Image (tube, rainbow, N blue to C red):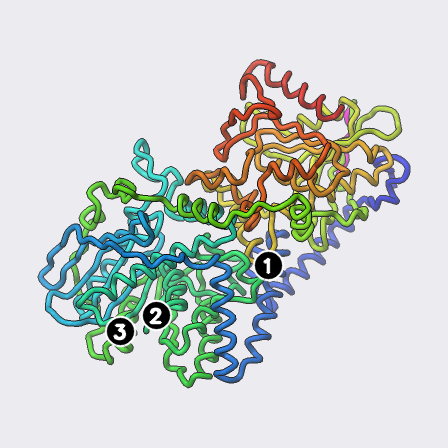
Amino acid sequence: MPDPGGAGVQRAGYHRVPSSHKTLMKLATLALLCTLFLSPSTLPAQQATQDPFLRWMDQIAQRHLQRRENAIAEIHTVAEAERRKKVVRETLVEILGGLPDYDGPLNPRVTGRIQNESYTIEKVMFESLPGFFVTANLYRPNQPGRYPGVLLQSGHTQEGKAEPQRLAANLALKGFVSLAFDPVGQGEREQTFNRDLSGPSAGWSVNEHLHAGAQSILVGESVARYFIWDAKRALDYLVSRPEVDAARIGAAGCSGGGALTTFIGALDPRIKAVVPACFPNSYRLLFAGPDPDSEMSWPNFLASGLDTADFVELSAPVPWLIQATKDDYFTPPGAKLVYEEARRWYKLYGAEDKVSFFVGPGPHGTPLVSREAVYEWLIRWLKDGQGDVHEQPVTLYANHELLVTPSGRVEDEPGSRKLYQLILDDFHAKKQQRTIPELLAELRSLGIPSPGSPPQVSVLSETNHQDARRLRIRFESEPGVEIEGQLYIPASPAGRKPAVLLVADKTSNPWIPSTASIAERMTRAGRVVLELEPRDSPSGNDNRPFLGDWLSNSRANQIGLNLSAMRAHDVLRGVDVLVTRSDVDPGSIRATARSVKGIWVLLAAAVDNRIGKIWLDRTPYSLRAALENTINTDIFDAVIPGFALHWDLEDLVKAMGDRRVLWTDPTNWMHRPVALGPPFRYRYVLGDTTDLSDAEDNAYIEELIK
């Protein structure tokens, strides 16, 4: 076998994979995937079979879920069920980071009315927290009396409260008072409204939820706490109305509204009938499928031994109607898993009739038969079955007709506050600076350090150039996770040489040199370079503006892992590859990365002194700075739960001790350089089309590798 790196390479674990063996390996892998896919105990989505890293995470998720199912199977009495409910409630509140500790006034206002011959719509505003305004429409019958109340959660329509109006109007006709409110980021509560765009800079509501979701994780919370709190305060307002019977309250919603209905139905005992649609799904299918956004999927949820059925079971024996639609991406089979487990649970309470399952036709949404099932369920449990379950024609109003505020934006109200400001308040209240030794202990607990053993390296391909050889390599970073890289070997005389680990960056910016071109320059200077590609899940990146691969990071957090830390671990496994080569001087290893990837290198270097010097280029200078705005680019790729409460990036630099950090053009979280002064370094012109930027980059390269 040709020796790709000189004497001693075989001892480092390199082997070349013959093409015939590759074919056999592919067939064996395919057989394994088919076995996993068809196994009823794992039920992974097809997406996972096409994405190795997602498949690896899904296998961990399925192990968590199996342990949970084993625990559920041991529960045989109401007393045992009640003990689990207590633990589940405590765990959910802990994951949320607690609910806000506030019992101040709602300060409600009715700003207008729409009078219909059969019902009235009141335009309502109240404060969920001081200055945190919630806009809502209350639908009530025109006849005086006391009626059951229904809290309606809106799905992820940009208009928010206007979405469930057909349901709300029909409920008013059937003798209910219903309240539909705008979730954060929707309707009149957009968080990133831009007057030049006449719309949200983040793109739409879900994107705003994700930005706030990442910020919440940084301070050790789930952004769901604010959505749930808004729902609880909306419920406070609903039951305060004189025409509402507080002992007869229901909740319903679809999609994102189905998620919030699920959460508030589980956590607020005032709700006596619950109808979530197009969300309740077991993570047996959901994890590798349409894993939902930040307020719908909570950090550490699966690692804490939970699944969606826990929400239903937590409120047992309150009546639940779990709804799905035939062609929804929140699939009926996934919803049925929740229903079947909940039905067994309700049987313990002698209440099997209080949990039901309904599948409507068509795609994601609530078709007519599903809406009539909602009416039937609420009439059954809140009106003693007295009422007409059939839907009636109603007047539908345009979004602008239902607005509560004069401008259509709560941010124009005096004293109005945004969600990021509430998260920032939490940060200041909870911040507790910790020491560098504690930081290093945290990095070890995150699994960043390498075991130091040489990984088995496969050579996938080799090309020879006049000044260097290039090897496409693959190695296992940890069991089940393979990563790849490009190894550049200078054609200079044999002997040990300094080496550089360069994190690959496939930038599309034509003014920024590719990492491949930087690797070539370093190789020409006589350095061995490994252009490393840390683990990734391409199927998780849906190319939303600013957000990067948010979904892979979210999935990792759900199973109790952290993708930023795992990528830092990958960097150190790359160092293991370099130090075991006979042509590398193990005492002269450098590392470099640009943009948010620089944080992975900084995490790695803080815990491993084999990296003698690092170069961070266009890397954000602070994690805590991401809490100061509504939008942050690629923040999910740097989020470690609760990290910002105790440390910032400058602490990682301190952890490196006397080792050098070359940090050029430090940025904010919108990729704009920030003038911070020494020791940071700055280019004269970013993206200059002359050779100026190349000359500067060459100077920085020389400074790194010398």
Q: Which residues are magenta?
A: 461-465
Q: Which comes sooner in the sequence, label 2 or label 1?
A: 1
Query: Quarter of the image holding residue 48?
Result: bottom right
Q: Which residue is mark 1?
A: 58
Q: Which residue is mark 2?
A: 274
Q: CA distance from mark 3 to mark 2?
A: 12 Å
Total marks in image: 3
Between circles 3 and 2, the one closer to the viewer is 3
Outermost residue on the left side: it is: 117
Q: Which mark is residue 248?
A: 3
Q: Which comes sooner in the sequence, label 3 or label 2?
A: 3
Query: Quarter of the image holding residue 272?
Result: bottom left
What secondary structure is marked by label 2?
strand
The one nearer the camera, 417 or 481, is 417
- Residue 593 appearing in the image: yes
Q: Residue at x 81, y 44 (%)?
A: 16
Q: Is residue 137 left or right of residue 621?
A: left
Q: Is residue 565 left or right of residue 610?
A: left
Q: Is residue 627 magenta?
A: no
Q: Amino acid at mark 3?
A: Arg
Outermost residue on the right side: it is: 7
Between circles 3 and 1, the one closer to the viewer is 3
Q: Which comes sooner in the sequence, label 3 or label 1?
A: 1
Q: Is residue 528 left or right of residue 550?
A: right
Coordinates of residue 536 in the picture (x, y in percent): 61, 46
Coordinates of residue 578 in the picture (x, y in percent): 79, 38
Q: Amino acid at mark 1?
A: Asp
Q: Residue at x 55, y 54 (%)?
A: 555
